[in-house]
Each structure stands twice: as C-alpha cells, then as structure tokens.
Amino acid sequence: MNSKKKHAWLTSNQMILVYIIAVFSLIVGIRQPAFWDFATVLNTMRAAIFTMCFALCEMIVIISGGIDVSFPAIGCVAMYVPMYIINRVAPIDNAWFAFGLAVLIGLAFGLLNGFLVAILNLPPLIATLATSSIASGGVVTILGTREFTVLPSSLQAIYNTNLITYTSPKTGFQYVLNVLVLVPIIVCLLIAWMLKYTMLGRGLYVIGGNKTAARVAGFNVKKLQFAAYVWSGVFVGVAAMIYNILMHSATTSALMGDEMITIAACVIGGVRITGGHGGVGGVVLSVILITLVQNNLNMLGIPTSWQRFVVGIVLLLGTIITSWQTKRSMKMSQA
Amino acid sequence: MNESETPYGSETVWGFFSKKERPGQNMGNEENKVFLKLKGIKKSFGGVHALRGVDLEIREGEIHCLAGENGCGKSTLIKAISGVHEPDEGEIWINGEKVEHMKPIDAINRGIQVIYQDFAVFPNLTVAENIALNGEVKNRKKFVNWKEIHQIAERGMAQVGAELDPDMPLEQLPVAGKQMVAICRAIVNDAKLLILDEPTTALTEKEVGKLWEVLRGLKKKGIAIMIVNHKLDEIYQIADSLTILRNGKYISSGKISEYNDARFMKDMTGRDLVETKYDPAPSDEEVFRVDHLTLKGRFEDVSFSMNKGDILGLTGLLGSGRGEIGEALFGITPPESGDIYLNGKKIEIHSVADAIKNKIGYVPEDRLTQGLFMERSIEDNTIASSIRDYFHGMSLNEKEMREASERWLKDLSIAAPSIDPPVRTLSGGNAQKVVIAKWLNTHPKLFILNGPTVGVDVGAKAEIHDILRGLAKQGIGIIIISDDLPELLQNCNKIVIMNKGKVRLVTDNKIDKLSL
Ligand SMILES: Nc1ncnc2c1ncn2[C@@H]1O[C@H](COP(=O)(O)OP(=O)(O)O)[C@@H](O)[C@H]1O
Ligand SMILES: [Mg+2]
C-alpha cells in the first residue's frame, strides 16, 4: 500500500515535470557551462512573470470546468486605456490610478464572461471568444492603435525598484530582478491556499467535476462560475499593467495569441482541460519548463527560427504525458 | 434463525423459481413506526400525467421496493419525496407530521437522502471529500478542515461497513465503490430514509450481494430504505415489502410474501404475462444455413441451419465464440472459410457492406456505443441504415422518411411522444426497439441480435420477444445471441451451444426448463 503510494508519487505529473526540467538543464549545462549561474535563475524568473500570471488566471477558469480565451484581449484593454488616458487625456501620474483602472476594466469584462457563461449558459469557448472580440474591437475602434512606450514617473519608479541585483563573477555582467516578481509569487501562495483550504476553492473543483451534483449538494454553481471569470479578468488587469511597466510598451495587441501557450502551460501542469483537476504546484513547474526551453534554446545552438517549433514539440510531449496520466488514472477504476 | 443472513449464492438459486420462505417474510415489521406516508400524490408535466394518485407507506427498519415498468413514474415519485418536484395534489407525511411545500433542503433536514442513478458524486475528489463535503456545505463552512473531513469519512465508512481508501480519487473506484461512497455520504448526513434509484443496474452479481449486506446492516440500525428496482429475483432477495406502480397509478402494495411471479408480472404490466414457449409450425423451407464456417482463433467448423419460422439461439460462455459468429456473419470480422446460404442462395460475406447488401441486420451487444446515435432523433436513428432508399436523384424524400419512422414508432409501440426526441431520452427497452426499427427498415432477410434484452424491463422484454416471433413467422431468419438461458429456452426453437469456438450441441429445445 505504502510503496504503491510512493510509486504513484514518483510517477506523478509533477515529478515527471521535475525530471524533464532536470534533464533539460543538464543538457544545456553540459553544452554551455555558463548556464550554471545564479543569473539563470534570475533570467528565468523574470521571463516567467507574465506566463505565470496568465496561467494563474486560466488555471482557475479551467479547474471550474470552463475556458478563457479572452484574457489577452482584456489585458490589452486594461493596460492600453490607462496609458491612453495618462498620455493623451489627463496626465494622472499615479500608480494606484493605473493599476486601479486596469483592475476595474478586468472586472467589467470578467463580469461579462461570467454573465455569458453562468447566466446565459453559453459554451465558455464561445462566450470568451465573444468577449475577446468585443474588448479588442471596441478599444481599437474608440481609441485607435497607438503604442505608448514612455511610463509616467510613478510607474517608472516601480520599474526602477529591484528586489535583487546580482553581478556574475564569471562574466561581470549585472543581473536584476524587479520587485514585481513578488506579485505572481504571493498570488501563487494565496491561490494554493485558497484552492486547498477554503470552500470557495473546493467549490471550483466541485463544479469542474460534476455541475449537477454540485447543485444538488447545495453549492452555488453560478456564483462560483462568476468568481472564476471575475478573478481571471481582475488579475489579468494587474498582469497587463505589470507587462506595461516591465516592457515599456502598451499596445492593443501586445498579448494577443498568448492564450494558447497559457492553456498549454496549464494542461502540461496537470490542469485537465475537462475541469476539476490540477493545482498551483504543477502549473509553476510547467511554466518554469516552458520558460527554460524558450530562453535557452539558443544556448543549445538551435536557431531562433526553430524556437517556436521546438516549443511546440515540448508542448506536444507534455500534453501526451498528461493525457497518458489521465488514462492511467481512469484505467485503475476498471481493475 | 434469520433468513436474511443466508449467503448470497444460495439466495439466487431459489430467488427466481421457488416460492419458499423469503427474507423479510418473518421479520414482523408491523410494530415499526411509519416514517413516510404518501396519500394520493398527483403530478403532471404539461399534459403528461406522470403520477395519478400514488399512496405509499414506509416504516423504519424496513426495505421497501418500488417497482414498475420504465416511465411509470418511479423517479418522479422519488423527486416528489425529496422535494425536487412539488406534487400538484396529495399529502406527504414525514414522521407523523404533514409537510407542505417541501423544498429539497427541507427533505434533507428531515433525513431523506436520495442516491440517484449517477450517484451525484465528484469523480475528481477523494473518497473522504465526497463523503464529507455535502455536510460541510450544509453547515455553511467557509474553510476546509481536512482532519475533520477524514474523521467524518471514517465515521461514515464504519457505520456503513465500507472499506475504502479515503485518499483515493473517486474516478479510480469501480461503480460499486462510487455507490458505496454515495451511501456513506447519505449516512453521515443523518439519513433516516435512504432512497436508491435503480441501484443494481451497473453492478456485478458479487457487488449486488455486498450492497444487500450493507443495506441490511443499515436496516438493523432502524433506517428506512426504499429501492427502485424491477428485477424480480433481486426484489425477492432484499425487499420486505413492495409497492407497484403502472402508468403513474398506484396498483398494489404489501409484504413480499403476498407476491409471486405471476402476480408481480400482472401488476407491473397489467397483462397476464406468462410468456409461452415459442413453438412455430414445422416447415421444410430453409431460410439460412452455414457450413463449416471458420475464423481461426475465434471459431471453427460451425454448421447449422434454420427453416422458415425458426428462431435460433446461439449461446455459450463469454469467449466461446457466440458473439464472434454474429460479428462474422455481419462482416465485421469476416469468416475465413465455410459456406453461407441465405434463402437457398450461396452468399459471400467479406465486409459489412456485403452483409448489408445481402439484407443481413445486426444488433450489437453494446447498443449505446455501437448501435445508436444517442444525441440524434428517433427518426435519424430509424433511417440510419436505410438512408440510401430515400435518395431520389440528389434529394432526400423527407416525407417518406418521416412516414417510415412514424410507422415503426407505432408498430413497435415505442413509448415516445413523437419521432423527434433524441434517443438519449428513451428508456433501455425503447432504445432497443429503435435499434430494431433501424434494421427492420432495411427489410432484412436475416436478423442477428446480440443480447437483445440486456437492461430492458420485463414488459418491454416480452414485447421485444413478441416482435421477434412475429418476424420469424414472416420468414425472416432470427438469430438471438445471449447468455440469458431462460430467454433462449422460451423464445428459440433451436439452440446452438458453443464451447471454445466449436459447436458442442444443437438442440431443438424440447428440454423442459426445470430439468436443466
Ligand atoms: N421533467 C419532466 N418533464 C416532462 N415529463 C416528465 C418529466 N419527468 C418525467 N416526465 C415523464 O413522466 C413519466 C414518468 O417518468 P419517470 O418518473 O422518469 O419514470 P420511471 O422512473 O418510472 O422510469 C414519463 O412519461 C416521463 O416522460
Ligand atoms: Mg427512473
């Protein structure tokens, strides 16, 4: 019994991700000894910030039995509108205003998603596609397609605040890690706790597992669905503003297309696309793996033009492993 | 001296045929308090009168069986008891107190717990959570105390006598395990009346035995139990008393000892349903014959023939080749050698297309995945195999398609308001009739059915048998593949018994049923 549990743990989704990360790091490290440097950790963390934030949005929605393809569009609106106002309407140089407005915009579209899915009972894919078009089309029509590359000083101040500054003894280069990295880290911990120790969290799993049974048991299914989409909207607002600060760029299309890699990150991390499964741990590992691959392929001598292809292969392998794991779990019930 | 303690194995033997003493008969529950009493419950949906005045009385520490054919209103009655549907008329008394405008939560608070056919469990959560979570919601908990969840689960499993790993994800449990979890959940939520809607449909014989053991244990604790079931042998095994509904009407109720096979059938179906043995007029006109049919590894040297009017039964253990012969004749896995004659003409079968061209119809064992498009309408399913007949040039003749479907709906008395609802909404017996309609619409000359009445209730079963007999009389060759021996003995005038891929015995079924 105990050895069976141990075996199950050793072959769990998360452990397999750990193995793959270890093997990949080993290969890169052998080809490029420069990889073995604290700088790699900092680089990976910095590059992983956005994917991690987006995955935290998408994960909650998928666990609840839905899917959200609207967060890139919502994010774009949430960073573009405040920057448009600051640059062209009224120079409100206040970080609270920028983040606050981004959150409000995210909240509005999250409520729209919640309404379409929970109240109108539209299939989540269709509902969030519609929201995506409304958000994206609306902002382009009303406010045009500019690019804002200069931050107001309050946001620039955040950009200049680093958590860690590190000078590599090997190369002499200086590496920094922005304070905003704390956002996904703290939110990861909060979400992990929420999912495991609150009825809200269990409720999300419950409606992802069996909506009818959830209703019979007395869960408020509509409220929980609203919670998932509203969370996704609100937090993508925050994430988009972080993007704007770190990249010095706010456009109406910067994040478009990110939904695919985000959904893939969730699925590889053990969040089953059919809902009700997965958690923060697996998604963190999966985001780390994807970021490592994206960042270090050139170290392996693979030309940049091949990167998308290789990332695609990694996604495919990861998805195959998860679906194989799912099947294995289902098969045990036949035994 | 408690009959109900007899091991399961011996019960099955006498459960079906004999009228010896049965459990419950001498349990003497007269003194037990009445827990639930229904008077004249009526409920209609639009124009459908699902319940037309039902009385029911269930006592503490009693196992009460609710029986009736599919669609007679059993599930609707359960929903009335559990507060899901408010009855249009009638009284509900719980524990001597009249309850009005009952909502689901009121029913739960009064100790009524229903285990629906899908168990309403969460496949993605652990056993422990499944048992404890509903109670936590009811108590309006905001946070999860995992230690408490485990304690509740352990307590529930101890009370029920279930041994499950509390940390096991539910999706890894077999159906019977999920059902146990649902029972444990009902018990930790203080069930005083436990209602199970058709609990044995997906269970193996051994699992049914375990379920009875658990229910008898709960009964001893004074819990009232109501089971929806229409399998006679199972009712004899477990029930103390019985209520029979037909067409939403209360028909009869009483101690199990007051019933025998004949009364049960009569009350269920409204007909004297003593199925007569099939005995067609002898004929020399050969309809179908196979000589030395062989498919290596499946079956070898199989020969048999059928004359006009014959219904041929093909039986044997699983893996004996009985199912494989059906699949071979329909061209799914074509035979390698041997000759096939249909109506005196030699035919070749190398593919399903060959079989269909030669007017052979086949109802597979697993009709849900192989024989039907569950989400499509009755009409779409009925014409699925004969759609070519309705092409006139480039267009489909919709009118003819509807007419054909409507004719089968009537001829096979499929219980559905029209040919438009999806097959998913039909009961097992009616779904099976749609499969039969689909093939009859191709006007087959040979009709092979694998397990034609699996999951079909008694009334519909008899109807399907009648249909097959009628077809045989018209000269269509009927082959029934089944392991349901009583069914074969009653409906086939010729039986081929297979063993390890070879024909062991061909009988003309003159053996008496009891001498077997
Ligand atoms: N919600 C509903 N709306 C309309 N008709 C219904 C509904 N529920 C049940 N019925 C009808 O009531 C009758 C009894 O159904 P049901 O109680 O499910 O039968 P059983 O459980 O005995 O098979 C059937 O004719 C069914 O079509
Ligand atoms: Mg029913």
Image: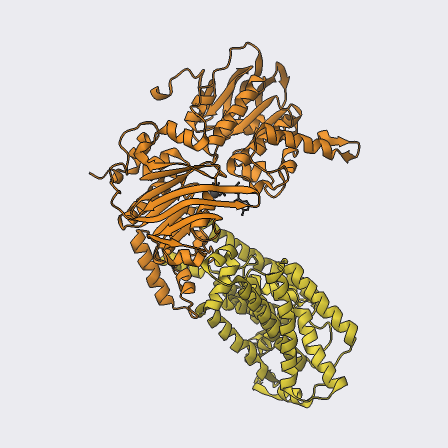
| Quadrant in which residue B277 is drawn | top left
Colour in which the image shows chain B: orange
| B406 and B280: which is toward the camera | B406
The single residue placed furthest to the top in the displayed view is: B284
- Asked whether the viewer can see residue A27, the reply is no
Q: Residue at x 50, y 23 (%)?
A: B300
In the image, residue B178 sits, relative to residue A24, either above or below, namely above
Image spot of residue B149 (x, y percent): 37, 64
Relative to B60, does residue A68 appear above or below in the rendering? below
Residue B494's x, y, as percent? 47, 18
Q: Residue at x 49, y 75 (%)?
A: A190
Q: Is residue B241 left or right of residue A259?
A: left
Which is nearer the eye, A32 or B126?
Answer: B126
Q: Which chain is yellow?
A: A
Above or below, comparing residue B365 to residue B107 in the picture: above
Q: Total of numbered circles in the picture?
A: 0
List the single residue furthest toward the left.
B1
Location of residue B245 by image quarter: top left
Residue B191 in picture, x, y percent from top left: 35, 54
Residue B401 place in picture, x, y as percent: 69, 33
Q: Residue at x 67, y 79 (%)?
A: A244
